[in-house]
Image (spheres, helix red, strand yellow):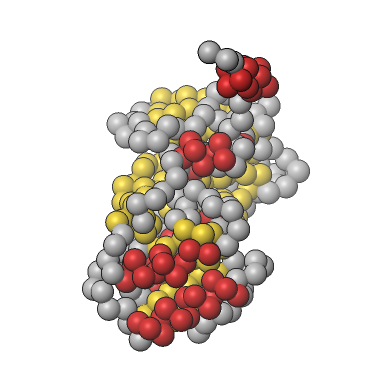
């Protein structure tokens, strides 16, 4: 990236107080002689709307959800995103709002490195591919169950009726997937995680696949229809009685985060946010060892 910035893209949380963070961005942009436009989260307008393709950098002010919105706007045009935590530090935010001035000066000086993120690419049997950085969720839209069939290398893995399915990237395996009882992929691991949602009967374990597997999911929305959710946002609806099949794969280097070399590890972040918590027995043991005289 050139060390001169002409235009800065902005994504903002719809409700959080952002006065100080916005002031930091505006002051920095003025020093750079750069224009500010808003490329995502347009329900709260803090700058004129613009196109991420015309920006040198996209800044997300909020949390992981805002950063995801910024990444979706920036990824198709290969623009980096700086995630700023205006609250608690998340998995995708690189800096807290109180340290934003220094972070932006480092970005301007080129003192940062790219953190590439893969995406789950879901290609339906009709229509355009969908990309999810965290997860693709196929879920019932009404009172009735949906029917889901998962195949691996052309062989049925499992078919079930229930609420739906979460398909996640390694990053997303620590989000909805983990909350739904699915496995977490360790840092550095690859593949997809498919986790059934409230399956009714049968034996339907979560599935972890590799790059070598051909994976597809067929969704029969039944009488009430279904929704396709991408990274927590409703992407599309599927009409009743119209099954659709998605081919799933992991696509490398889909989006880019700005890293300042101080990123918290995935496991440390999960433990800090108490998403991973030791059992009481471990806590008692650790306290006993910490107070032992020898």
Horizontal and vertical percent position of residue 78: 31, 64
- Name which residue lies at 36% across and 55% down: 259
Quadrant position of residue 250: top left
x%, y% of residue 168? 48, 41
The answer to which of 274 and 191 lies nearer the viewer is: 274
**Residue occupying image coordinates x 58% and y 33%:** 276
| 145 vs 127: above or below | above
Front-most of 56 and 250? 56
Q: Residue at x 51, y 59 (%)?
A: 96
Q: Is residue 216 above or below residue 155?
A: below
**Which residue sits furthest front?**
293
Outermost residue to the right: 143
State the image quarter where residue 53 is shown.
Answer: bottom left
Instruction: Please indicate, yes or no, whether residue 124 appears anywhere in the rendered image.
Output: no
The residue depicted at 34 percent of the width and 67 percent of the height is 107
Is 84 drawn above or below residue 216 in the view shown?
below
Instruction: Decide if residue 234 is on the left or right side of residue 261.
Output: right
Residue 269 visible: yes
- Tell me the quadrant of the picture where the N terminus can be found: bottom left
Please give left or right for residue 64 compared with residue 186 in the image: right
Indicate the position of residue 119 as horizontal and vertical percent values.
39, 49
Residue 261 drawn at (x, y percent) = 35, 52
Report the residue that reaches farthest toward the top. 294
């Amino acid at each position: 990236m050139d060390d001169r910035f002409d235009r800065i893209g902005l994504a903002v949380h719809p409700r959080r107080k952002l006065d100080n963070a916005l002031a930091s961005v505006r002051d920095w942009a003025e020093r750079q002689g750069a224009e500010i436009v808003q490329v995502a989260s347009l329900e709260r307008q803090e700058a004129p709307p613009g196109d991420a393709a015309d920006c040198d950098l996209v800044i997300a002010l909020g949390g992981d959800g805002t950063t995801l919105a910024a990444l979706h706007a920036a990824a198709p045009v290969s623009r980096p995103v700086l995630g700023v935590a205006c609250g608690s530090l998340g998995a995708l935010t690189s800096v807290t709002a109180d340290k934003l001035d220094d972070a932006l000066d480092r970005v301007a000086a080129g003192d940062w490195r790219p953190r590439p993120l893969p995406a789950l690419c879901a290609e339906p049997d009709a229509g355009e591919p969908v990309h999810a950085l965290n997860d693709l969720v196929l879920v019932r839209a009404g009172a009735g169950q949906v029917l889901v069939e998962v195949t691996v290398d052309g062989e049925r893995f499992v078919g079930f009726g229930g609420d739906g399915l979460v398909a996640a990237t390694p990053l997303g395996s620590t989000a909805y997937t983990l909350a739904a009882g699915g496995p977490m992929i360790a840092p550095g691991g690859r593949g997809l995680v498919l986790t059934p949602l409230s399956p009714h009967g049968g034996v339907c374990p979560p599935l972890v696949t590799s790059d070598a597997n051909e994976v597809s999911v067929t969704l029969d929305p039944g009488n009430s229809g279904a929704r396709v959710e991408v990274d927590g946002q409703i992407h599309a609806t599927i009409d009743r009685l119209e099954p659709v099949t998605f081919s799933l794969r992991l696509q490398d280097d889909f989006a880019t985060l700005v890293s300042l070399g101080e990123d918290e590890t995935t496991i440390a972040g999960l433990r800090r946010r108490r998403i991973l918590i030791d059992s009481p027995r471990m806590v008692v043991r650790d306290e006993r060892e910490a107070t032992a005289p020898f």
